[in-house]
Structures are given as C-alpha cells and as structure tokens.
Amino acid sequence: MNWAWLLIPATYFLASISFAYWAGRLNGIDLRSHGSGNLGATNAGRVLGIKWFLIVFACDVLKSLVPITIAKWLVVHGANPYLPMLVAVAALIGHSFTCFHRFKGGKGVATSLGLLIGLTPIVAALSLAAWLVAWLLARYVWRMGAAASVSPASLVSAVAVPATRFLTCPHPLALNELPITVFYVLIGILVMYRHRSNIRQLLGHRALAPPASGGADAPGQVPVKAP
C-alpha cells in the first residue's frame, strides 16, 4: 500500500486550511489584523463571538483527527504502523505553519487535541482535563477574562501532554514507544513556543493590551456579535 503515504502530504495541505481565516472572511474581516492577530480558535472567539470559537475549534480538531482515523484504518489493511504518527506530525505542522498564509498559522492547541484523541485517547482526556482546570482557575480565581484564560490553560496542557504520556505508558522510552513519546515532548515545546508572547505577558502580569478603539477586541472578552 505504497499509495497510503500520499495521506501525509494530503494531511499537510488539509491542515494548512485556516478555518479561523475563513471565519473572519465570512464576517468581512481579516483576523490577522484584529485581536491578537493569530489564526486560531481563541482569536476567532475574541473577535467574532463564542459561536465562531466553537466552529473553528471543532474544525481544527477534526483536521487532525479525521486523517489519523483514516491512517489507522489503512494500518489495519497493511499500511506501515508509523503512518498515523507521521500523519499527526503533518497535521500539526500544516496548522501551525500553513503554506497558504506565509507559514504563519494557529498555535496548535485544538489540532494537538485532535491528534491526541486519534493516537492516545487517555492522554487526550487527561490533558483536556488539565486545560479545563487551569482555565477555570484563571477565569474565576485569578479573575482573568474568558479569552485571556485560554493562554495559561494552553500552557498547562502543553506540559500535561508529555507528563501524562510518561504517567500512562508503562514503557514510554521503549523502542516501539519512543517515537510517540518524543513527538509528545515536541508538541509541548511547540505549543509553548507558539505562546511565547503570552508567556512574556503572564510573567509581566499583563493581559492582552486592548486596541485603541476598545470594543470587541478588549482583553479577556468573548463578545457576542450584534444582530
């Protein structure tokens, strides 16, 4: 099944489609010039409202989950057993460094969740739980806005991914398990790297600075569009 390898470049191009960008275009704006300027679900929610956050988030999850599911089906029918992981790598790279927008894409959180669900559901569940707990603490204990709370939650989940891999896999450094373990460590590093500006803001105890005009792009808010 040599043709199965074509799924890797196909996944890259699929993942390179920025659903956040097109959500903005459907609303008559370019998200790269609004909010944080990031082509991800959080910025879509910050600028366009909660409905678009949910739509973009779901699409970003599926852009990795669906190809990995196909790859696992191909493995059952004789494809190389490493195909699902390589497809996952292609999905993450495509989303984070999209060829359609000068290799500037999203921060990879939703797409990482999709590939975790596809490869190791237990790691996905625990990492999502860590994200949720961190978001609730940031939102209701430290009184950060709904959108502003996403960044610290994403950083916590970036650490949780490799941590839960080591906790749930009996032999994470065994030869047959090592590729996924290394991949999960790299996912954590990539997500933290993509959030480096947020890390600087958190260390400086500053939220995302509001635009001069205020309004829908104000920090920590997920506005609902006016009818």
Image (cartoon, rainbow, N blue to C red):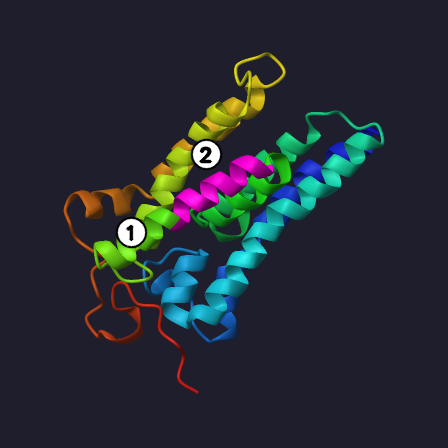
Sequence order check, earlier mark of 1 and 2: 1
| Quadrant of res 115 | top right
Q: What element carries label 1?
A: helix
For the residue carrying disc 1, how many other residues have a C-alpha within 10 Å: few (<14), some (14-19), or many (20+)? some
Q: Of 91 and 142, which appears nearest the observer?
A: 142
Q: In which quarter of the image is the C terminus?
A: bottom left
Q: Position of residue 62 (x, y in %)?
A: 61, 52
- At x 20%, y 60%, the residue is 209
For the residue carrying disc 2, how many other residues have a C-alpha within 10 Å: few (<14), some (14-19), or many (20+)? many
User: Marks 1 and 2: which is nearer the front?
Assistant: 1
Q: In which quarter of the image is the N terminus?
A: top right
The outermost residue toward the bottom is 227
Give me the C-alpha separation between circle 1 and circle 2: 19 Å
Q: In the drawing, does residue 218 fall left or right of residue 75?
A: left
Q: Of 89 and 180, which appears nearest the observer?
A: 180
Q: Which mark is residue 161?
A: 2
